[in-house]
Amino acid sequence: MTIEQSDRVSSVRSQPGQAVWKAATGFITRKPLGAAGVVIIFTMIIMAVATPLITSHDPVEWNLTDKLEAPSLTHWLGTDEMGRDLWSRILMGARVSLLIGFASVAFGSTFGGVLGIASGWYGGKFDQVVQRIMDALMSIPGIILALAITASLGQSLFNIILAVGIVQIPRANRVVRSQVLAVKESQYVEGARAIGASNLRIMTSHITPQCVAPWLIIATSALGIAILTEAQLSFLGLGVQQPEPSWGGMLSGSARDYFVLAPWMAIWPGVGLSLAVYGFNLFGDAVRDVLDPRLRGT
Amino acid sequence: MQQYIARRLLFGLLTAILVSLMVFALMRIAPGDVAQMIALDASGGEASSITEETLQQIRESLGLDDALHIQYIKWVRDFATGNWGESFFTGRSVFSEFKTKFPVTLELVILSQILAVLLGIPAGIIMALKQDSRLDYIVRILSLAGLSVPSFWSATLLLVGGAYFLGWNPRLGYVSFFDNPIENLGQFIWPALMLGYISAATKARMMRSTMLEVLRQDYIRTAHAKGLAAFVVTARHALKNAFIPVVTVIGITTALALGGSVVMERIFTLPGIGNYILDGMLRRDFPVVQSLVLVLATSVIMVNLLVDLSYGWLDPRVRFQ
């Protein structure tokens, strides 16, 4: 190592902020589409959080004098058949979608992943039982499983998150489990066992770190699917209930009936939904490319 | 091989039994009294006129007062013999309704999967062969859009937009393929295309990545080196191996298409299983929901079984394990 190089290394080390900045610009230049996804997601999160600041209209209250108005300066995206401002309803819909998306992935993919670590590590009968349950869960089409859960348990926010989350369990489980099966045979796990580490210790400090990358790939790709599933549930009438705004719910029924008079009612929620899912998919693809060395450059 | 088939069949049966347990449990933990709902439905919404006696009568006639395990055993036994019970609300036999509605869903799913293969596989091959070209980027963006734009939105826009701008008449009555094939296809092509586009996107992306992987193998370089035409290398050497992982996702895309048919049948008012099951769910019509979910899951299990078997046939490495 020359003196110049060591200088550079130490200067980077002394300013951690610079290193983060470098990594960020590196990500943008190498994965421009992924970066675009991040921008979309962050914009949506900020808008969803700051909803009260960027709109003064109530998203739920009726205002029949203003019904079916075209987009204008007072109502940026127009109004619906009850005179409700679509811009504020879209923003509230973003809140619901993002909340259900993140919460269901946090529950479903995490639960599936932890179960995958345990069943991969212990193997044997426990693994057999878990895997057959995963087979069963996977054989019911996802949207039908989610519909059946909310139809049976009721359509509270918690139940919707539960329903959308359960659908994601098997995939996270399978991916993490196969990683565990590969890592299990490695020498350092054998070493850990030889010095008397407990099962719990090996799983948490030796196996889990190796499973983070494949798990992240699954979890980020699950975000878009989760948001789509929620929208479908609400569209079909078994998700978020009216008059609470949700993108899927806004597209059902009245949006179709009033299409000739007010096409914007059927357009904006779909645009919001597509953009959100597209953003998550772009981001998920970039995460997969970066974390999965086998696919790097493809 | 025979042992392998027997093992897979056994697993399939086990999975179906687990599904039946799950669905049964899900329908029983539902809060609220079904008898109450039926009585309310029958009395026209007058809650005050419902007596405890009528409730008890309803429970008895539906077998809801039996112990849970007896209810389950009865259901599974009846299910296996084609007696799937009657709808709580219409009183019609679930099995005979299923027989008239299943062809609709089957046609929709098969048509959508044919379209998906016709669109998705060539798109994937083109993307891999022309990697990083402008064409690759365009097709990639289109295929990612297929996964992002919700089909129920594009289908709604297509339907209302078509009615408004092109003067389409939404055909409300369903026409059987055997009565009038042309009108039938005119009815099915749009929902099938909407449904197929999602599957096509999945297949195209899968095809692209496996094809790229295969194209880098040594035997492909060998084929090129011995002077084979580029087309022959692609068609005879690369495609064969690239297809294997794509075949395995057919099980997944079939399950997806079956789920998606609920939405498409709803939007295009097709009298299929999806519409039927959704009505059942909205009304908590348990006999309809539990039997149909089990049937759909069983069909997915069978498709997966066929995929597994064809996998063994396509890839000798699997066959000899």
Image (tube, coloured by chain):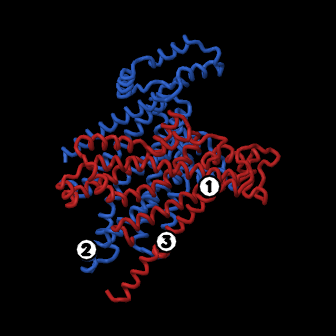
Residue placed under numbered mark 3 in the picture: B137
Per the image, label 1 sits on a secondary structure element best described as helix
* Label 1 crowd bin: few (<14), some (14–19), many (20+), radius 10 Å: some
* A87 left or right of B142 in image: right
Per the image, label 2 sits on a secondary structure element best described as helix
Report whether residue B255 is seen: yes
The disc numbered 1 marks a residue on which chain? A
Residue placed under numbered mark 2 in the picture: B218
Among the chains pictured, the one given blue colouring is B
In this view, which residue lies farthest toward the right? A65
* A192 left or right of A138 in image: left
Q: Nearer the viewer, mark 1 or mark 2?
A: 1
Q: Where is residue B170 in the image (x, y as percent from the top left)?
A: 64, 46
Q: Where is residue B148 in the image (x, y as percent from the top left)?
A: 53, 58
* Vertical side of A20 occupied by B147: above or below: above
Which quadrant of the structure image shows residue A5? bottom left
In this view, which residue lies farthest toward the front? A14
Q: Of callouts 3 and 2, which one flags the residue occurring earlier in the amino acid sequence?
A: 3
Q: Identify the residue at horizontal 29%, vertical 50% (top origin).
A: B308
Distance CA(mark 1)–CA(mark 3): 34 Å
Report whether residue B96 is seen: no
* Vertical side of A296 occupied by B200: above or below: above
At label 1, the amino acid type is Val
Q: Identify the residue at horizontal 25%, vertical 38% (top origin).
A: B10
Q: Where is residue A71 in the image (x, y as percent from the top left)?
A: 75, 57
Q: Nearer the viewer, mark 1 or mark 3?
A: 1
Among the chains pictured, the one given red colouring is A
- How many numbered discs, if any? 3
Q: Which mark is residue A49?
A: 1
Which quadrant of the structure image shows residue A141? top left
* Vertical side of A183 occupied by A140: above or below: above
Distance CA(mark 1)–CA(mark 2): 53 Å
